[in-house]
Image (tube, grey):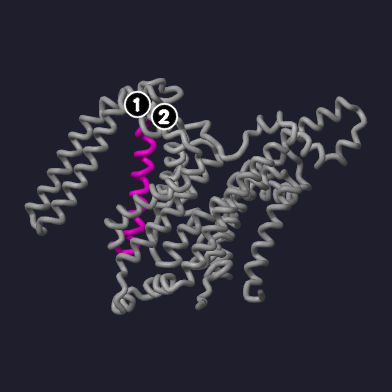
Amino acid sequence: MRKNLNVIAAYSIMMVLIFLVGIFQSWNIALSIFNMCLISAVMTMGANIQWGYAGLINFGIMGYTALGGLAAVLISVNPIQEAWQAGGFNILTSLCLIILMVLVIKFILKKFHKSKLRTYGIASIIVTGIIIIRITAEPGIEAIEAVNPAKTGFLGGFGLPIIFSWIVGAFFAGGLAFIVGKVALGLRADYLAIATLLISEIVISIIKHEDWLTRGVKNVIGLKRPAPYEVDLQTTDWFISLVEKFNSGKLALISNMADRQATLNQLVIEGSSVFVKLCYSGLFLGVVIVLLILTQKALYSPWGRMMRAIRDNEEAANAMGKNVVKQHLLIFILGSAIVGIAGAMLVTQDGLFTPGSYRPMRYTFLIWVMVIVGGSGNNFGAILGGFVVWFLWIEAAPIGLYLVNLTTAGLDDSHFLKVHLIESVPYFRFLMMGLGLLLIMRYRPKGILPEKIEIK
């Protein structure tokens, strides 16, 4: 217990801060922060597996997150029958051509020795295949995007419960990671970082511009939810009775029946939002706990010790007969798959898919800050980093506004300095993030909860 005292203390402080937000602001805000912290924790676990376990730099996190969101759309949205009739055959034909092209290239690589002729042959197959696929798909794409573009204009999905997309998102992200890993994992660390970032930009660009698949920047809204809808709860007898029971003391103080009913209606509206967020909290917390158990088991298993040995000295591990390339590819796929789960969770909570919101140059580094602040190589530290950084990211503006009002209490409300500081409050998050990162790097260079090497 004593050796885990710092972990218990850190998480206790974090929970107290979230409870204070609920007390002084609202429980809706507190639960929203908590849910986003849980999703961030899943992302940081994925990044921590790659960097903390194996020393792999992956700046393509947003690309895998977007693939998780794409999975949520393809799984939960009902199929658009008109769109399938208009251009579904062309899309399926193009997909078959892509599979055929991949199989032919794989056959050539397997059966023929490396030579200029083989290289030119593969290049000509790729170029010819792309031209044929484009000619085949173009009419179908135009026909699909012309089907009621204000509401649909895409093929839709399978109409299944959205929670299945969490698994599919992991497969999507893991599949892309396999392709990227085969191409880029042989690169030096700095080149790998640049390559993964650029591939992430390519993936997001495709998702944003292929309207037939995702509606592009027109967004997909009204996705199915694994939690009840607030409007349904507000008209359900058991929920109204539950809210009335929880607030019986407050309602008893109101003697006027009309005012009491109005107050109860308002409490039901607020309570329905809190209840839905609690449902999401339970689902997300379950995912975090399961992933934490699995990653902890993996970390202290012989495989985890091998990965840390590869991370610390690749040459020595290779000399001991360990297949470094194979293990790097495996852990790259595993980490990316977990990030894909987080992407599907994020879209599930929001109920909409907005490809334009995935900005690798901004949010990728925010995730990396979470891992660094929490402590790379430590799963508990990575999760804590997700909580700390996201809490500061959201609460920086309220905290900044409070500090401005406190320090300028003696100034008139129209004073230029006070007005300027209040207008600058939205930018306080960048100041606090930078200051917090500097302090952590100065006094806790290995993170709040640094890696501990234990043998179990």
Q: Which residues are magenta?
A: 187-211
Indicate yes or no whether the magenta region holds residue 341.
no
| In-front residue for pair 393/148 | 148
Hey, what amino acid is under mark 2? Pro
SS for tag 1? helix
Hey, what amino acid is under mark 1? Trp
* Residue farthest right in this picture: 255
Residue at which label 2 appears? 79
Q: State which tag comes first along the sequence, 2 or 1.
A: 2
Residues at circles 2 and 1 in contact by the CB criterion of under 8 Å? yes
From mark 2 to mark 1, how far is it between C-alphas?
8 Å
| In-front residue for pair 88/434 | 88
x%, y% of residue 396? Answer: 63, 50
The residue located at (45%, 48%) in the rendering is 167
Residue 328 placement, left or right of 301: left
The residue located at (58%, 59%) in the rendering is 435
